[in-house]
Amino acid sequence: MLLLVSCSPYNQVLKGNDYNLKLSKANEYYDAGKWLRAGELYNQVLPVFKATKDYEMIYYRYAYTQYNTRNYLSASYHFKNFTEFFPGSSKAEECMYMYGVSLFKDSPRYNLDATSTSRAREVLVHYVNTYPTSPTVPDAMKYIEECTEKLETKGYHAALLYYNMEQYKAATVAFKELIATYIESKKTDYYMYLQFRSAFLYAQQSVLNKQQERYVDAIAIYKEFKSFYPNSSYTKEADKLFDSAEKSIKQLRNEHK
């Protein structure tokens, strides 16, 4: 069986030195959807055909073999290279889109490294701005939205981690940054409520001579919350904290008379 595999037509071409035959077979495999075999052969012929008219087509197809074998990081690298090597190509627009899509496909869950997610969003936003009339813009916008949601979720859980660890100063800052970054989110009232709650708890756990100042800072966030989100479902809870903060301030002032 090993002998049969080693002597298969594909392996003979792969191990041979006829690069025109390799390219011909790579194209056959590509057209048949045999991406792995096509990719291996294209990889061999790319350096040989670099200075020829066929190089653009080979590189374009090689990038797709990487994408279709789910080697998304490699695909993103080669689609990006294509747009740089062949900026005037009729395929440049498509490859910029596929560069972003490949990064999106490489993007892991929100709780893992966000590098591909952030880059995918950047690339797709650039694509939409560069080719606003492209028929793939609606799909690009969906990918952008998904990336934004994933990054927002990651930011929220990072801020919440500070809160759950009772690092309330860091939580206050993290929720503030989350709001600033995702100002159009449907959850900004919730984030601001948590920012206020974190600031309140930070004041509460502070040493006595710092409490009044920090309660005042917390109340400033509360007033902003009430101004921006008067009908928020978190208003009742925020009001309770506000009342408690005011009482604490009065008590502290009375103690220092």
Image: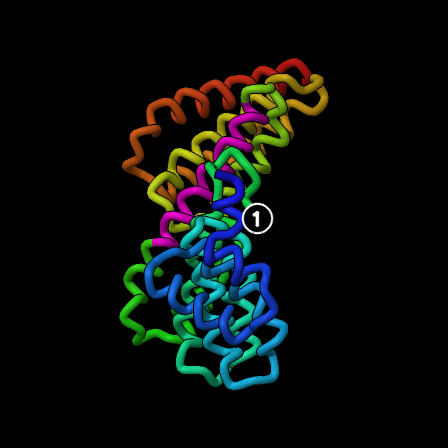
Q: Closest to the observer: 236 or 2?
A: 2
Residue 181 visible in the picture: no
Q: Please report the bounds of the magenta region as a residue range.
A: 143-163
188 with respect to 107 (left or right): left
Name the quadrant containing residue 249.
top right
Name the quadrant containing residue 98.
bottom left
Q: Position of residue 207 (x, y in %)?
A: 71, 18
Q: Position of residue 62 (x, y in %)?
A: 49, 65
**Relative to 49, residue 41 above or below:** above
Name the amino acid, label 1.
Answer: Thr
Residue at 43%, 31% in the rendered image: 193
**Relative to 245, residue 8 above or below:** below
Q: Position of residue 232 (x, y in %)?
A: 31, 34
**Residue 154 magenta:** yes
**Residue 72 magenta:** no
Quarter of the rendering occupied by the C terminus: top right
Q: Secondary structure at mark 1?
A: helix
Residue at 44%, 67% in the rendered image: 25
Name the quadrant containing residue 91.
bottom left
